Amino acid sequence: MPQAIRHTLLSIRELFISAGPVALLAVGLLVLAYLWLDPTPPKRVTLATGPAQSAYDAFGQRYRKALAANGIEVVLMPSQGSSDNLRLLREGKADLGFVQGGSNEHATTEESGIESLGSLFVEPVWLFYRADSARKVTATASLTALTQLQGLRLNVGTAGSGVPKLMDKLFDANNINKQRIKISQLEQTPATVAFLGGELDALVFASAPESLLVQMLLQTPGVKLMDFAQSEAYSRRFPFLTPAVLPRGVVDLARDLPPADLRLVATTTSLLARAKTHPALLQLFAQAARDLHSPAGWFNRAGAFPTLDHSEYPISREAERLIKGGQPFLQRYLPFWLANLVERMWLALGIIIAILLPLSRIVPPLYQFRIRSRVFRWYGQLREIELEMAAEGADTAKLTSELDALEQRASRITVPLSYADELYALRNNIKLVRASLQSARR
């Protein structure tokens, strides 16, 4: 091996050995920080949605597709609706879920361990009725007040959907005797079939307009949507309700559906998550929410959702950062897994660097000590030979043999070229002692 390469490898080896303790400490701190921060999210997450063909179900499919792009499998958990989703979150059976405003009336948010990723969309109360049934109540065949439902057959949805509780509140506010309404609690699809078959006079949904059943009923001949003439009053009586307007022609411009503006009352649906859900997953869901719900809709302008308003639960820090500040800087240029790792480890890295910088100052002196010790440790033996030379009756033959052995060892010492002067100095000093010994023998 050429001498230059040999000296270079020696220098590198000694440098690694000198810096080894600091490097091991750095690796240990990084491992501890990684275990503590847990920057890598699980690859599987459960999202509580709603009944089949509902808006919650449709949005769940879209979220699953959005997160699949980052290697996250979203398991959709069908449910009866908002109240059912809230129960699944509290019991730990779901990680996230769509929950309608007002569903937590009796909940204590501090004890629930649930946080919000923001309000996603407006969820109007759709009260559809048959025109022929309404004609029995009013000559105009149009319903504008809940009091006009008395004597009719009304489906309010399953208990898990949250709609029955909502309708109970509205009935109580109108002093309506529910015994005078034939109320049923069928699921959405069977209720719609019964409604179209004439077995029901009216049915209620609380759903986003993306619901397939809502879209279908809005365009079905002989089916009308109730105009909540007192929508503003409802919003004043119930803080979780807001007035909404279904603009004329928004369903079908060519057919002018609806033929006039319709006043509705609506809640906002939030995406709730268990507080123990991994922060990186919350960030991914918040990003998907921004992409899916920010376009303009029937009841909102572009960019109105997701929003931090109307939240009944503490807002997740990840969602707040994304909604207020937009996509994190690193994620614009790096894959999500790498950007997420850097974002979650940068503070730990800063602390580790602050600890290691002072320690790193000992590496050059330690390196220098290790190199020089390869030479200096032989000066002790050389000094002993000198002391024996000065003693009376010194065995010069023995001392000469020891000098020869020491010189052989010195010839095998290898040091980086920058320290070669010290090696040559050792050899010269051995020669000086040899010269003194030879003078003493004469």
Image (cartoon, rainbow, N blue to C red):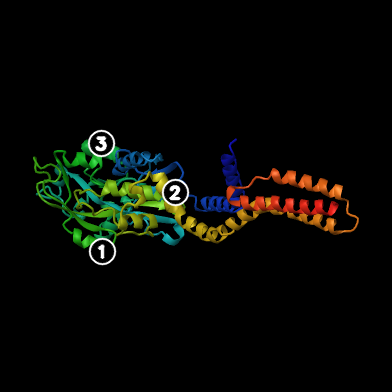
Mark 1 or 3, closer to the camera: 1
Amino acid bearing label 3: Val
Q: Point out the tag, 1 or 2, that comes first from the N-terminus.
A: 1
- State how far apart marks 1 and 2 are (Cα): 47 Å
Q: Quadrant of the N terminus?
A: top right
Horizontally, residue 4 falls left or right of residue 389, namely left
What residue did someone put label 3 on? 193
The residue carrying mark 2 is 341
Type of the residue with mark 2:
Leu
Is residue 159 visible in the rendered structure shown here? no
Q: Residue at x 33, y 54 (%)?
A: 322
Pick the front one: 324 or 416: 416
Counting residues from the start of the chain, the first of labels 1 and 3 encountered is 3
- Residue 257 horizontal/vertical position (percent): 12, 44
What kind of residue is marked 1?
Arg
**How would you rate the neighbour count of disc 1 (Cα within 10 Å): few for under 14, some for 14-19, many for 20 or more?**
few
- Nearer to me, 58 or 156: 58
